[in-house]
Image (spheres, rainbow, N blue to C red):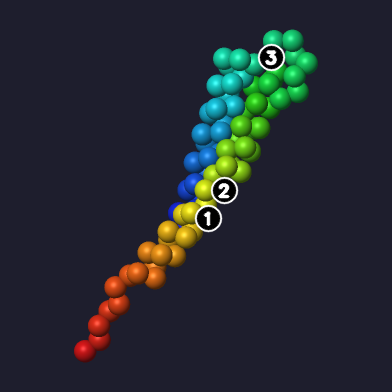
């Protein structure tokens, strides 16, 4: 599994935690807010945003991974 999937999954987990924390601490008491009035809406929205942000970070991870593959020492054959 490549390193880039870990960035996306990490972003999803952190986003979900952030979305839940936002609902718990700030939230919407009136029920008129479509995202923050229900905990699972806020958590799902946070997970989606976290996954998107994690996906933005993957090009840097892919570039680093490619650099590591290209600079690996070559095996000498005798």
* Residue 12 x/y as whole percent: 56, 39
State left or right for residue 71 relative to residue 32.
Answer: left
- Specify the label residue 56 is tagged with: 2
Distance between the alpha carbons at the discs numbered 1 and 3 = 36 Å
Residue 35: which quarter of the image? top right
* Quadrant of image for the C terminus: bottom left
> What residue is at 35 percent from the left and 69 percent from the top?
71
Q: Residues within 10 Å of mark 2 (few under 14, many from 20)?
A: some
Q: Residues within 10 Å of mark 1 (few under 14, many from 20)?
A: few
> What residue is at 60 percent from the left and 35 percent from the top?
47
Under tag 1, what secondary structure? helix
Are circles 1 and 2 on residues that touch, CB within 8 Å?
Answer: yes
Under tag 2, what secondary structure? helix
* Residue 4 x/y as whole percent: 50, 53
Is any part of residue 8 visible from this angle? no
Q: Earlier in the sequence, mark 3 or mark 2?
A: 3
The residue singled out by tag 3 in the image is 28
Q: Nearer the viewer, mark 3 or mark 2?
A: 2
The residue singled out by tag 1 in the image is 59
State left or right for residue 40 relative to residue 6.
Answer: right
Is any part of residue 10 visible from this angle? yes
> What residue is at 49 percent from the left and 47 percent from the top?
7
């Amino acid at each position: 599994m490549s390193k880039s999937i870990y960035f996306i999954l990490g972003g999803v987990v952190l986003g979900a935690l952030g979305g839940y924390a936002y609902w718990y601490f700030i939230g919407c008491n009136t029920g008129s807010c479509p995202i923050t009035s229900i905990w699972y809406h806020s958590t799902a929205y946070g997970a989606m945003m976290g996954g998107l942000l994690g996906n933005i970070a993957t090009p840097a991870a892919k570039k680093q991974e490619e650099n590591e593959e290209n600079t690996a020492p070559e095996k000498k054959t005798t």
